[in-house]
Image: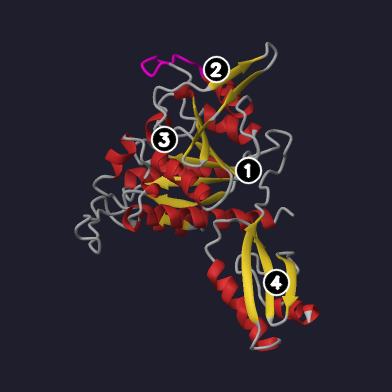
Amino acid sequence: MKDKILDALRNVDDPDLHKDIVSLGMVQDLEINNNKVTFSLVLTTPACPMKDMIRNACINAIHHLVNKDLEVDITFGSKVASGQRNREELPGIKNIIAVASGKGGVGKSTVATNLAIALGKSGAKVGILDADIYGPSLPLMMGIRGLRPEVEDKGETVTIFPFDKYGIKAMSIGCLLDENQALLWRGPMISSALKQLLVDVAWGELDYLVVDLPPGTGDIHMTLAQQFPLSGVVMVTTPQQVSLADTKKSIEMFSHKALNIPILGIVENMSYFTPKELPDHKYRIFGEGGGMELSELYNIPLLAQIPIIGTLAADSDLGLPAVLNEDILFSGPFNEMAEKVAQQLAILNSTLV
């Protein structure tokens, strides 16, 4: 009977990897007890948006090809694949996701924070690093403003322990310096600070480390892309043409043959305004179609269109990211974005095996 069930399940393909779930090793712990079939499906990410579709396909395959009267009980697990092409640096971190933008003021840090928390909510082990040396936003957005991390100094080595907040690990240079201190740093000092935040922080084992980059293109971007094994980049823009022009420069930089970092997709922030009392209305204040224009131009996915919501900025200033809100108007777009980012990484990582 087990062989018949496995043969039936060979007709079920992972919709992203385009191979059957048995060959991919996703079917585990198959047991048959009287009329009940139980097994686990080990997915490539806990944030998989296709769980229900895969579950239904498995049940249908067993009912049609083995026995329609069998009771099928499927549990889901996950094993996130590593996107690191060179794991000598940060071996405990499977995937480093950079969140970048061509210009400031487009909500990049909001996207990075909510992406990290949404991935953590799905069951993944997640960290977030605020690498915006000159304008760190993470302490405010994560509600850790004014706090100092625990530091263990053993002379030759220094270990910085990240904060645990909202189910993820978080660190920012803003938690190590006086927030009113002006940083008069040149390129080498900036690069050195970034390396310390990546290497000296006790991240432990992570499925995803989200890195919130400063806007534009500069030393931090080059250091991260050249010296650390980035899995991919999420680009944040607004619909405005001025934002698109700057975003194109960032995409070109990461895609350049000298770096060759995969672009996971585009997030169009401030896509439209939706009043809470009129959730079905969309007012395109900053124009329309900018994110789709970039998606089509570079043949990369449009991951999300994030609306302007009246209290989103105020809640962020209070350290309450939107993805934690029970109202789907607030959290829905960020949860969908996280699912698509995890999906794109799973597809990309499957090519590295």
> Which numbered disc, 1 or 2, marks the residue closer to the eye?
2
Q: What sort of colour scheme is used for the picture?
A: secondary structure
Report crowding for label 2: few under 14, some 14 to 19, many 20 or more residues within 10 A (C-alpha): few
Q: Which residue is tagged 3? A: 142
> Which numbered disc, 3 or 2, marks the residue closer to the eye?
3
Q: Residue at x 25, y 53 (%)?
A: 273
Residue type pointed to by label 1: Lys
> Which numbered disc, 3 or 4, marks the residue closer to the eye?
3
Relative to 62, does residue 205 appear above or below in the rendering? Answer: above
Q: Which residue is tagged 1? A: 257
Residue type pointed to by label 3: Met
Q: Which residue is tagged 2? A: 189
In this picture, which residue range is highlighted in magenta? 178-186
Residue 211 seen: yes
Q: In the image, residue 164 lies at what x, y percent?
A: 51, 34
Residue 300 seen: no
Query: Is 181 part of what is drawn in magenta?
Result: yes
Q: In the image, residue 285 lies at what x, y percent?
A: 23, 52
Q: Secondary structure at mark 3?
A: loop
Q: Which residue is tagged 4? A: 20
Relative to 335, does residue 170 appear above or below in the rendering? Answer: above
Looking at the image, tell me whether mark 3 or mark 1 is earlier in sequence order.
3
Distance from disc 3 to disc 4, alpha carbons, whole Å, reads: 41 Å
Looking at the image, tell me whether mark 2 or mark 4 is earlier in sequence order.
4
- Pointer 3 with pointer 4, Cβ within 8 A: no
Residue type pointed to by label 2: Met
Q: Secondary structure at mark 1?
A: loop
Q: Residue at x 52, y 44 (%)?
A: 252
Distance from disc 3 to disc 2, alpha carbons, whole Å, reads: 26 Å
